[in-house]
Image (cartoon, rainbow, N blue to C red):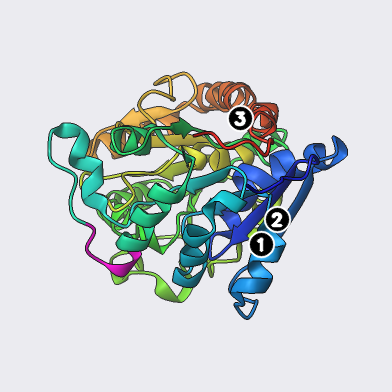
Amino acid sequence: MTAFPTTPRWIVLSDEARALEDIYFFLPAMAALRKEGTRVERFETRRWKFSPRLAQARLTGACLLIARSLGREWIEMLEAHREQHGRICYLVDHLYSPELLSAEEGNSPPEAGSEDAQLQQRLFTLADEIVVVSEQLEAALVSLHAKVSLLTPPLTGKLPDLHHLEQSDWCIGFHGTLSHRDDIVALAPMLRDIQTRHSDSEVELMMGRHLPLALSDIPRLKTMEAVSWEGFQDYCSRRRIAIGLAPLMENSDNRAASWLRFLDITRMGGVGIYSRRAPYVDLIEDGVDGLLVGDDSAEWTAALERLLGDRDATRSMAHNAQHKAHEVGDPLRVLDFWRARSTVARAR
């Protein structure tokens, strides 16, 4: 039987999800945990030539956090020496078997097909606890594992003053990644129409050279290249928008998304227009701290006209959105989550 050290120790086995690790662990929790005596480190698994013996020596007795994915050789090593580690938490923001999202509707869980899906299934089995970032993921996985916990995103930066909303020219921003391409392309005709009729607004997209042709002829369009996670955090701290777009269309590839987009829009000082479905439908109070709309482009047009036309009401919603962001994004909630798990004892 392995004798675990008495000092709590977290090792994050980092694969390709550095932003996920930062948002849900390092930024809200690392400094406080270290101050309390917990050892915390990030282990870059892809930059380190794998050696089972050296890896096992490094990991023995530690609580492990795995975010989204992990290489096959690492999974095999953990499976072979499971009793030598403390608690293993698997942080999930994506399902490599998207069919799992429909399992809650009565369908049988699908057989894992791709290699990524098979490796994720092994991580489900290996983990003491699956930590998910959205209620959609929680519903999809709760019947597949004994312990599934929801951890919603924290606010990772300061909120701005809203002086930019007193200016005459307003920015409509969409800062989704390329995985959101189809969602924003669906709004292209609506954006062209809005920009044709409003000379005091610009549209900003973060797609650069990957800008879809359908979006290229929007009047007063500003497009910039996608940036790194660290670069985007710096950009959010400096950039100011009036309106943020968060489309999540039916059959979107992003159905498992958290409501991190709400925090991004609010950090840039904007009011969001959100699709009327999870994760936004239970978060946004329609007309109070944002607007909820269906997939019909006419609803998006009406929402933009409302925000551009009644600027006093828009400024009020922006203030309310900041209050909500402070409430739902309190980093202390995330710190308490990991503090409660900073023990060497296994959960099951």
How many neighbours does mark 1 have within 10 angstroms: few (below 14), some (14-19), or many (20 or more)? few
Sequence-wise, the earlier of marks 1 and 3 is 1
How many neighbours does mark 3 have within 10 angstroms: few (below 14), some (14-19), or many (20 or more)? some
Which residue corresponds to mark 2?
A: 234
Q: Which segment is the magenta one?
A: 112-116
State the separation of the CA atoms marked 2 and 3: 19 Å
Position of residue 26 measured from the top left corner of the image (x, y, whole percent): 70, 47
Q: Is residue 115 magenta?
A: yes
The total number of labels drawn is 3
Q: Residue furthest front?
A: 1
Q: Main secondary structure of the magenta part?
A: loop
Position of residue 86 measured from the top left corner of the image (x, y, whole percent): 62, 45
Q: Mark 3: which secondary structure?
A: loop
State the separation of the CA atoms marked 1 and 3: 21 Å
Please tell me which residue is depicted at 18% across the width and 50% down the height of the picture: 110
Please tell me which residue is depicted at 28% across the width and 33% down the height of the picture: 143
Q: From the image, state whether disc 1 or disc 3 is nearer to you.
A: 3
